[in-house]
Image (spheres, rainbow, N blue to C red):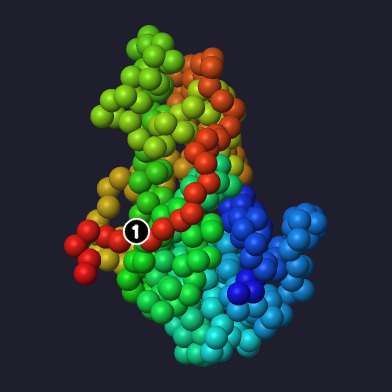
């Protein structure tokens, strides 16, 4: 299968690199010519344009920073979409937008796969990540070998747009975890607790979480570097709010979280690293929430393994 990959940023670069490393015929495209040049040096082909990539490839994957960017690229590809062509959307996008574009692709005879990745960037390199994938079962079987080269856990989710909904729900929960970890660490410091001891206590307790065990470490190091920025968090929780609003759910936590990140963006800028949302509390208290012995960036020490399909309990 010939695969096109559009979007070589922090996540897309690792995912497309996994395909290339595992012997897939990959054509890449990005607005950053240096990123494309690096991939070509490693054996990928350079894509002239999105429409040419859809013409020449069996499947084209988009991994882009916003629904607007995805819309622009898919509309460029649309004239070449037809029977035998697959569009795989790995961006974090709006469920309604995914339904709109996916329906257009299907109406032209192509296949649309809503397959956002649930990832932290350091795990994408070792493929220790999860994919949520909506598409018909036949298409899922076709693209499963690609997904298992990029990720470890693959979940076939249901109707068009369902994967995007699950992705923004997961991102909402991760953001809530980040905010509560920040409040917990600052409160511990203010109460006179040793932060190294606090980290370990939370890690071995009922209060632990994936976010604490990863992001709290780079917070305490002071680098706060998870290769994810405040504007991207704001986009994700905004998409979650849209889902809840359409479903008529009167959320209480998420509107407050949006206000917190609006304030963080106003203070520190949209491209500030997202864990630096803790600086709001550091500034308010005059406390320095750092401690020795923590890494400046997260790494994944688990070996790369082939991926597999996750089947929900109770599904026949």
- Is residue 92 toward the left or the right of residue 25 in the image? left
Nearest to the observer: residue 155 or residue 246: 155
Name the quadrant containing residue 168: bottom left
**Which residue ends up furthest to the left in the rendered image?**
314
Tell me where residue 47 appears, x and y as whole percent.
74, 71
Q: Is residue 178 above or below residue 247?
A: above
Give the tally of numbered discs: 1
Residue 212 seen in the figure: yes
- Residue drawn 30% across the image and 45% down it: 253
- Residue drawn 41% across the image and 37% down it: 211
| Location of mark 1 (residue) | 310
- The quarter of the rendered structure image containing the C terminus is bottom left
- Is residue 67 toward the left or the right of residue 198 in the image? right
Tell me where residue 94 appears, x and y as whole percent.
44, 66
- Residue drawn 44% across the image and 15% down it: 196
- The kind of secondary structure element at disc 1 is strand
Tell me where residue 60 appears, x and y as whole percent.
60, 73
Q: Residues within 10 Å of mark 1 (few under 14, many from 20)?
A: some
Nearest to the observer: residue 23 or residue 76: 23
- Residue drawn 34% across the image and 66% down it: 157
Q: Is residue 193 above or below residue 17?
A: above
Residue 76 seen in the figure: no
Q: Is residue 60 above or below residue 186?
A: below
Tell me where residue 14 appears, x and y as whole percent.
61, 52
- The quarter of the rendered structure image containing the N terminus is bottom right
């Amino acid at each position: 299968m010939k695969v096109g990959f559009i979007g070589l940023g922090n996540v897309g670069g690792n995912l497309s690199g996994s395909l290339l490393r595992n012997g897939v015929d990959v054509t890449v495209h990005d607005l950053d010519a240096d990123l494309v040049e690096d991939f070509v040096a490693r054996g990928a082909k350079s894509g002239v344009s999105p429409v040419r990539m859809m013409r020449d490839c069996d499947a084209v994957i988009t991994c882009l920073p916003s629904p607007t960017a995805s819309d622009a690229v898919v509309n460029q590809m649309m004239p070449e979409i037809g029977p035998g062509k697959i569009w795989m959307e790995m961006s974090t996008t709006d469920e309604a937008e995914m339904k709109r574009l996916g329906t257009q692709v299907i109406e032209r005879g192509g296949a649309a796969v809503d397959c956002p990745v649930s990832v932290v960037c350091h795990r994408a390199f070792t493929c220790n990540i999860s994919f949520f994938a909506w598409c018909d079962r036949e298409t899922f079987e076709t693209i499963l070998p690609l997904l298992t080269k990029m990720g470890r856990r693959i979940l076939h989710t249901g109707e068009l747009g369902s994967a995007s909904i699950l992705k923004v729900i997961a991102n909402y929960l991760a953001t809530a975890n980040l905010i509560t970890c920040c409040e917990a660490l600052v409160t511990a410091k203010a109460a006179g607790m040793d932060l190294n001891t606090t980290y370990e206590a939370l890690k071995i307790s009922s209060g632990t979480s994936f976010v604490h065990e990863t992001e709290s470490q780079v917070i305490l190091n002071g680098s706060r570097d998870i290769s994810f920025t405040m504007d991207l968090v704001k986009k994700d929780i905004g998409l979650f709010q849209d889902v809840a609003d359409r479903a008529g759910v009167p959320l209480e936590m998420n509107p407050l979280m949006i206000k917190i990140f609006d304030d963080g963006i106003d203070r520190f800028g949209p491209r500030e690293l997202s864990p630096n949302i803790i600086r709001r509390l550091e500034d308010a208290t005059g406390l320095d929430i750092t401690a020795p012995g923590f890494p400046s960036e997260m790494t994944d020490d688990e070996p790369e393994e082939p991926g597999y399909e996750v089947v929900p309990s109770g599904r026949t």
